[in-house]
Amino acid sequence: MKYLPFRFSISKQTAIAISLLFTFGISLPASAKAQPRLIALSPHAVEMLFEIGAGENIIGTVDYADYPSAANQIRRIGRHDFIDYEAIMLLQPDAIIVSGTTTASMQSRLRELGFKVVDASVSELKQIPERLIELGELTGHNIEAKLSAEKFTHTLATLKQTYQHRAPVNLFYQIWPMPLTTTASPWMNEIFTGCGANNVFANSVSEYPQVSLEQVLSSTPELIIKPVYHGNSDQEAVNWGKWPEIPAVANKQIVTIEGDLVHRTGPRVLQGMQLVCDIVDSVRSQQVTAPAAVAL
């Protein structure tokens, strides 16, 4: 990853206000006051800040923070498993936004260095509007954050009301092919159940359990979803066509989706949920229209 050079810039409005302040002693209007300079250590935090109109506040972020397109211009100061502390010290942000992918040791070190650390972690979908409002308060974008939060809450409720009580479909979600890994995380299960899907490994002890081919075979999934996203290995490494006894294989219900839409716990996750719901519904429709077996 090529790290971009740091560039300092202020808006035209702020520049004019500062000029007036020094020339005539006129006070800065509230809209022109200095905005907090932020480092966001996860792609979903970057997406949240842009969602509420605070994207220009971000002065540093991590690899793979690529949405919206403007995020690609932000300086990279690390990744999920590495932080360039020297770069952060030079940037001197007012706050650093962390998430569940930021290790405890990294967060501890940032606090030791004297930085304000703000946790934007999400374990349930209902926490996303809460985090939007918190970031709005941090950046002064309260109105935009409140509107985004209300829109998210309404859309989530509508999706659940529309799909969650429909006929269940057994789903295997292939996070990773080698070793074969799935998910049982609370917010992912919430997406699946909200779509009326039954995650066949929902009750696993681990949030991201490794499973065997035999376990998948015995769970008889009617749908297999394979997300494709930055950093995951070849999702085609497992050739499910070898096991036609699996209903999803027999009925050709193995689907690839854009993983970032589902795995990033920002506002776009509802686009991912809608996508999952549509896929599950197509399997459900196939079951309804399938010709009944002829009695002998």
Image (cartoon, grey):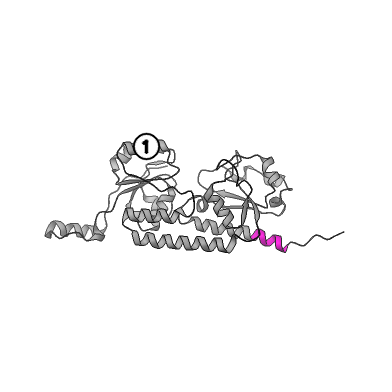
Examine the image and state in which quarter residue 194 appears: bottom right
Horizontal and vertical percent for residue 197? 62, 55
Tell which of 270 and 258 is nearer to you: 270
Q: Residue furthest right?
A: 296
Quadrant housing the C terminus: bottom right
Examine the image and state in which quarter residue 49 appears: bottom left
Q: Is residue 156 left or right of residue 20?
A: right
Tell which of 130 and 230 is nearer to you: 130
Q: Residue at x 64, y 43 (%)?
A: 238
Q: Residue at x 31, y 57 (%)?
A: 140
**Dot 1: within a 10 Å radius of its alpha carbon, few (fewer than 14), some, or many (20 or more) residues?**
few
What kind of element bears circle 1? Answer: helix
Region in magenta: 282-291
Examine the image and state in which quarter residue 294 appears: bottom right
Task: Evaluate whether residue 12 shows in this view.
Answer: no
The residue where tag 1 is placed is 108
Q: How many marks?
A: 1
Task: Evaluate whether residue 27 shows in this view.
Answer: yes
Quadrant housing the N terminus: top left
Vertical order, 33 against 183 (above or below): below
Horizontal and vertical percent for residue 86? 32, 37
Q: What type of secondary structure mainly makes up the magenta span? A: helix
Q: Residue at x 35, y 36 (%)?
A: 109
Does the magenta-highlighted stretch encompass residue 285?
yes
Tell which of 252 and 173 is nearer to you: 173
Tell which of 210 and 7 is nearer to you: 210
Horizontal and vertical percent for residue 211? 63, 40
Q: Is residue 208 left or right of residue 286?
A: left
Amino acid type at mark 1: Ser
Q: Is residue 48 left or right of residue 30?
A: right
